[in-house]
Structure formats: structure tokens, C-alpha cells
């Protein structure tokens, strides 16, 4: 496709060669969708290719062929994987370091919906946030894929978790997932956050909203607190193409944190992009191994679409009304 609009998505047939010596060829059976897909389709994602490309960051399927130097894998093995774009397809050649075995009791769809968001949550909280037992964590988009996995990881490590959501229809899922407290984001967000904390210090924020919500969180953050930013939902607009005028207005009103004043508050603001970690292949593999060793439950799949309905699936995640993961079956 050419970036710019969801309408630019087209189905095209191409010949795929044999996998290289260090690669495996995957017969893809399901694709996990992410907000990064939408922004790359719009041409608003800096890490995305600038020319004609295949979107998609994660998938699941079975191994169809194996390169000469690949060890430990067999044709027919069920795997889930991450790629630097290119997942919206039925077959893919990929470096074997970027695939992981799907747990036996998970479906293919659950495999397709796990890695990108679970890695994001793990790396943000554990590697960057250095979260400790007894700390208090605010998780935005708490009913989304990252939010669900972040809560599971934080609870495993002994944290008190507060989830924020856009509307109250998602609260039942937060209760089911074991959040300690929850907030529906509104104009009184900071007061609601302080009420949920009930005198506790706010140690970590997993931030993906932006705007006033970001600043309210930063002001509430305790000394030695860490805000890890991995997205900015406030820039999402409706429509198949980005509304650049609205985006510009929101950009001009974006929150500004003066780095020269950070020593006075003793707070940290950290940015994170999964594509950067992807390019550190050995480190990426180590993070995935640590994550899988936690034996987290399968991802909550909120909606499933057939491949022919992929544009509608993307519009569904754009709506902000989904819970858990949106998956497309191939």
C-alpha cells in the first residue's frame, strides 16, 4: 500500500522465495492489530517505510519451511512472532530469532494478540520503569491489550494498580482483570486520581494518552516517579485519513515539560518505541524469554475479523471502543 489512508489498502499477489539460511517461512493464520498499524497506514508513524509497504507488526501461524542454519524448530510448529512491518500477508520469511512458540493451551488468535503489547508492557514497567514490589502504578487504556498485560505483570511483581479508561463500559473487565482501582477519564481526572491513590505515592505512569491527562499525571507523580510514554492517543482522529488540521492544533497545545526543572521535582520522563528494541536482536530475544518465563495468561481477544474485512478491523481499533486485542484471521 501507499501510506495516507485506510482506503489505500489493496490485496496484491507476490512470489515469496525460500527462507534464507537464518530464516523460517511462516504460513500466517492470524494477525494482531495495533495502533501503530493505523499510524503507519496514515503515514504518521516515523518508523514506518516511506514507500509502498506491507503494514503489520505481529502474527501467528505455523512454520512452513526452515533455513539451513536454523536449529530447534520443525515444520508444523505453532509460533507467534514480531516483524518490523510486513505482517498483513499469508506467508512471511523472518529471522528465527523473532519467533516464539505458542503455549499449548493458547489458540492461534491468542498467539497473534500477545507479543507486541506484552513486550511493550514488560519493557516499560520492568526494564525502563524498574518497578518494585509495593509501588503504585497508573496504567492508561487499562482495558486495551497493553493495559491488560501491564496490570498482570504489575500484580505479579507486587504493585498496586490503577487503571484509566475512556468510558464506564470497560470497568467490568478491569474488575475481572484484578485492577485495584479504576478511573473514567474526565475533566476532573486529577482529583479522581488522587482519590484512587488514597494517600499513596504515584510511582509509575504507563502513559499513552497525552494532552491534559499527561500533565495531570506528571503533576501527581511522586518524587523519584517515572513516567514511561509509549503512545499518544490524543492525536487519533476519526476518518480513513488523518485530520491534519486537528492534529496540528493538538500538537500546538501539547503538554510541555521543561527538562531543566526535572531535577527540582526529581521525576523522570522516558520515551519508548518497540521498533528500537526490535533492532537489538539479542536483547529483544532476552526480553521475550523473560516475559514468557512469567507464564502470563493468554491475551483477551475483544474482536476477530476475517482478512477480507481488514479495513473494518482497523477502523474498529481507531474507534477507541475495543477491549483487549483485535485479531484478523488469514
Image (cartoon, rainbow, N blue to C red):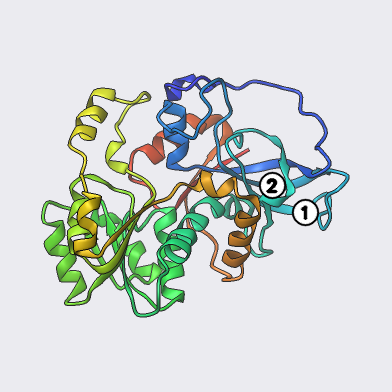
Residue at image position (29%, 36%) is 235
**69 versus 240 height, above or below:** below
Image quadrant occupied by the N terminus: top right
Image position, residue 36 (x, y; %):
45, 39
> Looking at the image, is mark 2 or mark 1 earlier in the sequence?
2
Residue drawn at 69 percent across, 47 percent down: 61
* Near-viewer residue (173 or 7): 7
**Is residue 184 among what the camera can see?**
no
Tell me the element at label 2: strand
Could you tell me which residue is drawn at 55 percent across and 55 percent down? 114
| Residue neighbourhood size for the residue with mark 1, other residues' Cα within 10 Å, grouped as few (<14), some (14–19), many (≥20) | some
Q: How many marks?
A: 2
Q: CA distance from mark 2 to mark 1?
A: 8 Å
Q: Position of residue 230 (x, y in %)?
A: 39, 49
Q: Is residue 181 left or right of residue 294?
A: left
Q: Which residue is mark 2?
A: 61
Q: Is residue 96 among the parts visible in the rendering?
A: yes
- In the rendered view of the protein, which quadrant contains the C terminus? top right
Residue 92 picture location, percent across and down: 70, 37
Secondary structure of the residue carrying numbered label 1: loop
Front position in the image: 47 or 156: 47
- Residue drawn where x is 80% and y is 29% of the image: 17
- The answer to which image quadrant residue 15 occupies is top right
In the rendered structure, find residue 246 and report the number of the disc placed on it: none
Q: State which quadrant residue 248 falls in.
A: top left
Amino acid at each position: 500500500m501507499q501510506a495516507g489512508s485506510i482506503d489505500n489498502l489493496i490485496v496484491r499477489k507476490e512470489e515469496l522465495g525460500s527462507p534464507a539460511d537464518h530464516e523460517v517461512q511462516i504460513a500466517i493464520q492470524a494477525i494482531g492489530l495495533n495502533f501503530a498499524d493505523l499510524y503507519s497506514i496514515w503515514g504518521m508513524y516515523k518508523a514506518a517505510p516511506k514507500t509502498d509497504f506491507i503494514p503489520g507488526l505481529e502474527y501467528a501461524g505455523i512454520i512452513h519451511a526452515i533455513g539451513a542454519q536454523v536449529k530447534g524448530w520443525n515444520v508444523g510448529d505453532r509460533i507467534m512472532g514480531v516483524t518490523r512491518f510486513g505482517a498483513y500477508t499469508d506467508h512471511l520469511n523472518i529471522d528465527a530469532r523473532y519467533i516464539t512458540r505458542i503455549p499449548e493451551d493458547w489458540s492461534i488468535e491468542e498467539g497473534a494478540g500477545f507479543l507486541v503489547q506484552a513486550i511493550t508492557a514488560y519493557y516499560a514497567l520492568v526494564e525502563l520503569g524498574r518497578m518494585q514490589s509495593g509501588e503504585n502504578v497508573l496504567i492508561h487504556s487499562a482495558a486495551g491489550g497493553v493495559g491488560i498485560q501491564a496490570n498482570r505483570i504489575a500484580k505479579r511483581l507486587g504493585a498496586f494498580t490503577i487503571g484509566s479508561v475512556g468510558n464506564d463500559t470497560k470497568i467490568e473487565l478491569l474488575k475481572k482483570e484484578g485492577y485495584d482501582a479504576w478511573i473514567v477519564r474526565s475533566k476532573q481526572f486529577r482529583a479522581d486520581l488522587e482519590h484512587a491513590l488514597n494517600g499513596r505515592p504515584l510511582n509509575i505512569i504507563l502513559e499513552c494518552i497525552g494532552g491534559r491527562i499527561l500533565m495531570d499525571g506528571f503533576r501527581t507523580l511522586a518524587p523519584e516517579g517515572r513516567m514511561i510514554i509509549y503512545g499518544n492517543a490524543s492525536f487519533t482522529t476519526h476518518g480513513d485519513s488523518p485530520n491534519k488540521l486537528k492534529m496540528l492544533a493538538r500538537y500546538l497545545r501539547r503538554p510541555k515539560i521543561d527538562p531543566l526543572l526535572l531535577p527540582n521535582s526529581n521525576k523522570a520522563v522516558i520515551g519508548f518505541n518497540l521498533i528500537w528494541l526490535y533492532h537489538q536482536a539479542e536483547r529483544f530475544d532476552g526480553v521475550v524469554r523473560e516475559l514468557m518465563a512469567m507464564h502470563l495468561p493468554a491475551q483477551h481477544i475483544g474482536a476477530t475479523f476475517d482478512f477480507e474485512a481488514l479495513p473494518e478491523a482497523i477502523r474498529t481499533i481507531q474507534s477507541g471502543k475495543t477491549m483487549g486485542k483485535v485479531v484478523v484471521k488469514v
